[in-house]
Image (cartoon, coloured by chain):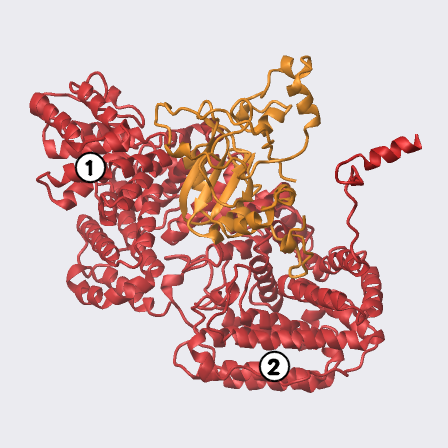
Chain colours: A red, B orange
Amino acid sequence: MFSKKRRADFDDDDGYRDFKPRIQKRQRLPPVVQLCKEMMPDIRTIGESVKAFEEDIKFLGDAIVNEYGHEDYFNNALLKTFRAVVLEQPHKQPAIALLTIVVNVKNDIAAKSVINFFFEELQNCCKDSINEDFENKSNETGPWNRAKLILRFLSILSPILLKDDLMGVYRKFFELSIELNKSEEKRNALSEAIYTNTLLNIPYLFLFNRDDQDLQNRVEELLSYVESEHKVKKTEISLLKVFNKNSPYESLELVEVILPNVKKALTNHMEQLSNLFPDYLHLLPETKEDHGFNDALELPPVEVLKPFSALNRGVGSVDGIWKNPRYAFRVYLANPAGGFETVVPITSYAGQLLNDIIIDITESMEFNRKEVAKQVVTLDLFFKPGIFAEPGESIAQLAAIYEENPLASTLKIEDLAIETILGLIFKLPNVSQPFAYFYTLLVEICQNSPKAIAPVFGRAFRFFYHSLEDLDLELKLRYLDWFSIQMSNFNFSWKWKEWENDSIKFGKTFYYAKLNFAKNLIRKELRLTSNTLDVEDSLPEEFKQYLDSSYIPKDQLHDYYQSLFTDNHVVDTSKIAKNSLYFNQESVPFSEEVRQVLDYIHKSNDVREVSELETILESIKEKYGALISDFDRFTIVLLVQTVVHSGSRSLSHANKYIGDLRDDLNVIFEKLQISNESKEFIIVEAVVRFWNSNSQNGFLIADAFKHAGLIKPQAILSFSFTEYDNKNYGLVDGTSIESTFRSLSQEADDNDCLKFLFERLLNITNEAIAQLQVQPQEVITIPEISEEMDIDVENELPRLDLLWKYETAVSFFKSILRKYADDFKPILPEIKSGLGAALPHEQTRAQLLTWIEEVDQI
Amino acid sequence: MSLAEFDEIKYDHSTKRLDNPSSYLLKKARKNPNGLDELRQSMKSATVYVGNLSFYTSEEQIYELFSKCGTIKRIVMGLDRFKFTPCGFCFVIYNKADEALNAVKYLSDTKLDDRNVTIDIDPGFEDGRQFGRGKSGGQVSDELRFEYDASRGGFAIPLAERVGSGGTDGSHMYHGQKHHRHHGGRRGRSDYGEIPDAMGQFRPQEQNDDQEEDNYVPQ
């Protein structure tokens, strides 16, 4: 047996047989790597379990004391982990600082290394801020925001830091902010950022150092210096306002509330701080201020910094938000019934700090929305218990609690987190991350605890719905997007019934914001699902009428096809099928020839000869010319619709056929005796009429014609804003508005498009004013619609509808001036000089001029 | 095989990134001599693979959702290679690589047509990869699926064949719970250039004998 085994072992040609274990050997990590792998996640999650916190600090502290300084791998892993937590999860900073202070007692080299590391990081932030080649990653919040967070961390370490060193850094930041602020008449973005950020950090100096009188005196002195030297410049830019009129809350800038907030927080023996932060003092060892910074912090000189100080060149998400004035954003207003707040007011230090922390978490961890979703709604664990009401409490429960005890907390962490994230979604002029991130982040938050969160979303949906008449046009689209994605993730269930009255009352209007929102929402939901029954079932009877997603009504569509023919051919409405070609129906006399056109289109590229197509067209003209009203127009419609029909299976198919047939179409269209402008208009019209029941596809395919060079973007705009039967779809239809913004964004460097749309909107506005029979000096007032209002449908609705049309057209100006501000700048002088003649109505002109003036400020 | 930076334990962030290759991709790359290069290529490409779609989800629906992450250049629907009907996956090709990573970060595991879509980085679309590689023409994952799934063709294999036959299909199914997906495994079949016309006259190529599983179940 022995020999047999030996023989088997040596039997192979290549000598001794390799021993291949059936299971691969498990890889053993070096002990230090294994230690880090187990320990660092504990640091990252520190404080998430309030019960285990004390033990965690003890165990982690001991481990760091023992391990730090032996192996570079451990040292680096620890410092990097500290940095990651400090920058990405700032609510855990007190815990990390406490850990450092605890470590300092037994291993002051480790603590000093932490301080050195962060100081160096702070210095690097300053360098990054003037680096032309700064690499702006999506999770980068910006060098100044990082500097804020590092300074905050160092401030918490104040018990072990030399006061002179720490206060020196504060003074430098304030001096820089003051100097930048003084360097120009108007607001300086960076100055505002540094001023607000640095002030926000000051209370953290006292987190573990509440009784240090000397520190208090120094801070007091510093604050009075800042107060006297730094003049806050309030900037009201109406272009950036969330509401066009009737804002439900007062406009406040973060920069104006920060100093009063901080001062209040420090008064009265810092009572506010004691009420805000958890009591970690019993865990704090006896400390000594014995660490200093190795070098003095070098901030960039103002003259070097100046070109970067507008924060307008890819500087990171949060720094970038400071480019424009930062206005407080609100959704959850004080409860109208009980008068209690559910969100910590921004006019308190706690409110401003929590808002800042949620934004930092959301922006810096955009690479993991699941973690963000978890952290922002459990933020209360990192603050003093009792600040917030129990998670998930309903408004009714809170109202009852409040009535019983007006001192009990009615603040909801869910409200605060969601309001802050919504603030990022509704930020003007642009958002800091792609919309998808914010939308799916909110979906994630809701999925984690639907029972608690769904009602919170519901209140936000209602808030925006009620403000739709006043909401900025672009924000209406964002609201629509968010709502539809939320719905598609939650079976489209929504209490439509509560909006039913709006439909009953205003169902006949065309420009009423709330009704258009509902229509656009239903259509968007239909586009997001292949099971339309889900959407249908979610709707009450009143809203089912909007399930028909036709762009124009059937009779109008019939008129369109009839207009191609003389009286000798009557178009049968029943033959105009959904997203299908009319011309190849049996009832059409030349359907056989149309089939030949379709066969031609299906031929492969190398065998197609355009002369063949021309022959077919000639034969139609010869035999059926008498039926057709305008053969040139007919030719375009026929060819465009047959191509679109051939590619009707999907967008890719459409693209392929348009690409394949482009040259042929060009050859034929060039020979037609028709202006280019009309030709292009007819093309777009033919496409969107074909796709009448799915105009989103229609506009996307019109885009494909544009990309193929067959039409200019102006043709799409021209089509969108042409009125049919006094109805301007370009102002209200979601797919059309999206297409308009798509066209403008794709043609950003060509301001012909902007000019074209501006002029078109001027015409629409002037016509509406004329129809309203308003004199140039007369003021137009849009009545507020309330539920109790009794409206005389016959007499009042037409005028109201006109007023809404006027209002929508004007709000379109606001959106495009803001969204394409940079592209508008070169043509604004020309627009401005001609506005007197182009827009006689004074009130409207004044409004437009205000916005035009503001374009330079954003 | 070591996957260099993809195997490294990193301490740069306080939580893991969602725009990393899935564990399936990592497993597959380890077996492939060019695996590391392909992974690196995937991180820089503007293409993503989208799985677990309903057969009824249209290109337009995908457009509606995925356009929120960036500008879409092209959507390539995954088709049953015999029937040319959607078989539950697609490739979305963006203009920029960042936008593709955004889709992985922000959209994976969200619902489209009431299904949680799975999204993975991808080295780039090549002709031929739009076809399902299961025996029946669809995705292998569906053939290994035991449960009834209405929006993915019901039962993939009739019950009788799956239980009593004792054939290769059955045994394969019960023991084949390995989660693999092909990734560029079927290269060089460039004759797929023409998109089938609306009437579906497109002729399939001869069946490839590559029987690698293409089951994609993210772990």
Real-space CA distance between mark 2 and mark 1, rounded to the nearest whole angstrom: 69 Å
Quick check: A18 above or below B205? Answer: below
The residue identified by callout 1 is A665
Residue type, mark 2 in image: Tyr
Q: Position of residue A289 (x, y in %)?
A: 77, 82
Q: Quadrant of the N terminus of chain A?
A: top right
- The disc, 2 or 1, on the residue closer to the chain's N-terminal end is 2
Quick check: A397 above or below B9? Answer: above
- In terms of image quadrants, where is residue B213? top right
Q: Position of residue A93 (x, y in %)?
A: 69, 66
Residue type, mark 1 in image: Leu
Chain to which mark 2 belongs: A
- In terms of image quadrants, where is residue A845? bottom left
Callout 2 and callout 1 share a chain:
yes
Mark 2 Cα-neighbour bin, 10 Å: few <14, some 14–19, many ≥20 = some
A143 to the left or right of A562 = right
Quick check: B123 above or below A182? Answer: above
- SS state under label 1: helix
Chain to which mark 1 belongs: A
- In terms of image quadrants, where is residue A35? bottom right
Q: Are marks 2 and 1 in contact (CB under 8 Å)?
A: no
Q: Position of residue B43 (x, y in %)?
A: 54, 51
* Nearer the observer, A749 or A132: A132
**For the point 35% across and 46% down, which residue is it?**
A738
Mark 1 Cα-neighbour bin, 10 Å: few <14, some 14–19, many ≥20 = some
**For the point 69% across and 12% down, which residue is it?**
B164
* Nearer the observer, B111 or B135: B135
Quick check: A778 above or below A281? Answer: above
* Nearer the observer, A128 or A839: A128
The residue identified by callout 2 is A170
Q: Position of residue A406 (x, y in %)?
A: 66, 57
